[in-house]
């Protein structure tokens, strides 16, 4: 039998997504973002959290989905992947789920308009709900975004 894995569940529109809790540092309320010139539209800028300057990406824009207005439920999930700290803007962040690795299926070619390369897999939570698990390494693929290390600020 597979091992239990923990995922933070969040939403983008009507779809539920998950990221491995081991990569999540904090979940923050929406805050002012300082725009950085010459970055893709989905790179919204940088925020300062407890003395760290962190680039922020709108996941809807990253996936080529239509961006929406931010609301009271909008959150920034601060993650670390490959020694890079990044904020991901999501519609809302919900619960932590334990999912047995045996219940994770390979991702189809397209889910909710998002290409399979950005997906780690699909987990069935029950008969009606599925959780789309993100492949954060690909979501933050530096060849497609920007050199995120350029946002490092010396103190």
Image: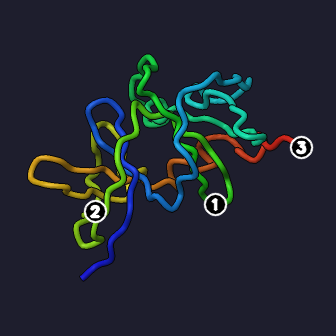
Mark 3 closeness class: few <14, some 14–19, many ≥20 residues within 10 Å: few
**Which residue was labeled with disc 2?**
106
Earlier residue among tags 1 and 3: 1
Q: Residue at x 27, y 56 (%)?
A: 122
| Residue 63 placement, left or right of 23 | left
**Residue marked by disc 3:** 154
Give left or right: position of 93 versus 55: left
**Element on which disc 1 rests:** loop
Residue 106, x across and y down, in percent: 28, 62
Residue 101 in picture, x, y percent from top left? 30, 71
Q: Which residue is mark 1?
A: 82
Whichever of labels 2 and 1 marks the residue nearer the N terminus, that label is 1
Q: CA distance from mark 1 to mark 3?
A: 20 Å
Q: Name the element at disc 3.
A: loop
Q: Is residue 14 above or below residue 10?
A: above
Seen from the viewer's position, the closer of residues 75 and 87 is: 75
């Amino acid at each position: 039998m597979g091992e239990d894995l923990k995922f933070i569940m969040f939403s983008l529109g009507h779809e539920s997504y998950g990221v491995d809790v081991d990569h999540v540092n904090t979940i923050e309320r929406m805050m002012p973002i300082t725009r950085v010139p010459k970055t893709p539209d989905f790179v919204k800028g940088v925020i300062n959290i407890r003395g760290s300057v962190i680039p922020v990406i709108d996941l809807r824009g990253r996936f080529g989905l239509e961006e929406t207005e931010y609301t009271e439920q909008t959150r920034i999930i601060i993650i670390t992947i490959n020694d890079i700290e990044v904020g991901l803007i999501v519609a809302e962040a919900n619960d932590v789920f334990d999912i047995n690795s045996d219940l994770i299926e390979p991702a189809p070619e397209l889910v909710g308009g998002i290409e399979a390369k950005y997906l780690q897999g699909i987990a069935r939570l029950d008969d009606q709900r599925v959780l789309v698990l993100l492949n954060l390494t690909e979501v933050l693929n530096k060849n497609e975004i920007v050199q995120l290390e350029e946002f490092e600020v010396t103190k």
